[in-house]
Amino acid sequence: MNTALYDIIGILLLFILGFSYSIFFMGDKRLFRTSVVSVPLGLGVWSVLWIVLNIFMSLIGLEDNYYVSVAVFCILLSVSIYFFYISRGIFRNRKFKYTLIISPIILLLITIFFHNLRTSIIFGDSYAFITWSYELKDLVSRGLPGFGLSVSNLSALFLPDYYNYSIHPIISLSLLLLIFDSIYNYRSLNGKNNYIKFALSVLLVFLVLSANNFIWQAFYVNQHNLTAIFILLLSIFLLEKKKEYSIGEKIYIVGLLTAITTIRMEGMLLSFGLILFFLYYETLNFSVRRSIVSAYLVISGFYVLFLSSVLWGNELFSAKKYGAVWILFFIFFLTENIIFRKYPKLMEFIKFAALGASFSFLLFLIIINYGHMTESIGNFASNTFNQILWGLTNYVLIILSLLVIAFRIKRKESIAESDALFYYFICCIILILVLSNFRPPYKPGWPDSGNRMLLHFLPLLPVWIGIELNRFFEK
């Protein structure tokens, strides 16, 4: 049976869900970005609600993925229609009308193209993710995130043995367009030298695209590029450093943090890092930050309880480790309420303290577990600079980063607001190396876990470079 129609319907449903979610909570100020990330956002909303409902139904003894999927589908379709109805005033905007007509047509053509390309990579964890009949707790007990299982269950709504492989390259295309938008439309740039800005944005997108590893991940049945989208999307939004966030924007932020937490087993660490590097700045209203972080701590706390119940006895993904990380951040949150209210300027040093603590912990692990850690670090470095895996992409990114730093030194500039992207990127590199201590050493080659995790935050580097080079050109 030709499944092209199922691919198209599934992708368009995700687009409608993500588009309505974004418009309702964020408004129509950035329609290009909204269109670009609608499919990934729709998939994120679907997956988070699917996981939550699955956990709830398992508590009352109704562990049936199909019924969960039908319930989630009905809920989200109803909510999307309601969101569109509430936001119907936006339809008077001509640009909005054109976007809502043109975007689905382009998406339809792209879906048909990738469906007819019939290219996908199924390896290792992929076999679990395309098997919709797994129970969520059984999958997670093996150390695999439930996010991938929700994707296969979305496909199973159409046919039991069907999987929408077009989702993965479409998400990867969304990532490239988001990188372009994040550089070209970064809000602090004054609009001069648009041709240079456009050319630089395109060149940096093609630099990422030229990496063999990116192409491989684009068709690999996993969620690495989707993780990268959520991280970049939230990072760029929080770089605006608003004094206040609306209720809709708060829900948007907490929703993305929750999606990042559930999409990868190390997701909670990535989310805590995003909070530290992007939400702690002096001009943000104290109560706004407290409400966002409190909401996320409650949600992640319940998720940790779920992980603890299914991972008990798992040596690699220890329930105690997740609990310890959550408790440490909770203690920090309690103490920062006292410290930063009295000394708000100390918030500017949080990112440096986080980098220093991460690096010190890495050095400690190297000392106490020298052979294991040096093997992992050596293999990770070998993969990162392997031209078969990454081409010249990582070499060029390092050269351009040094060029930005040289410009800074020449102009006697210290810290820019976009530097949070660079610092978070460095911290995530350290995180990859730290995590290797708690698992078998990283291995050379394409499928290595460390090599795949690098793509989660690699887009932050070209975006930072693009923003800074554009800023230099505009002066």
Image (tube, grey):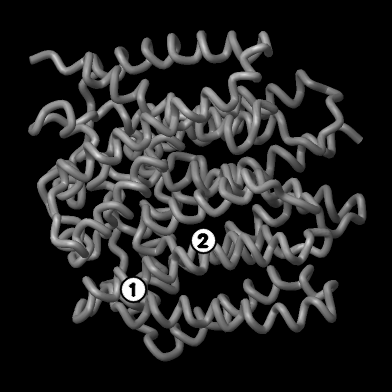
Where 305 falls versus 211 (above or below)? below
Quadrant of the frame with the C terminus: top right
Res 173 visible: no
Residue drawn at the location 29% of the way across and 57% of the way down: 145
- Where does the image place residue 295, in percent across and percent down from the top left? 55, 63
- Where does the image place residue 455, in percent across and percent down from the top left? 44, 48
Dividing the picture into quadrants, the one containing residue 236 is top right
Q: Nearer the viewer, residue 380 or 316?
A: 316
Where 158 falls versus 339 (above or below)? above
Is 28 left or right of 330, judged from the image as shown?
right
Binning the other alpha carbons within 10 Å of mark 1 as few (below 14), some (14 to 19) or many (20 upward) gives: some
Residue drawn at the location 56% of the way across and 76% of the way down: 358
Q: Of label 1 and label 2, which has the lower sequence position?
A: 2
Q: Disc 2 designates what residue? A: 271
CA separation, marks 1 and 2? 17 Å
- Where does the image place residue 346, in percent across and percent down from the top left? 80, 75
Secondary element at tag 2: helix
Q: Nearer the viewer, residue 205 or 171?
A: 171
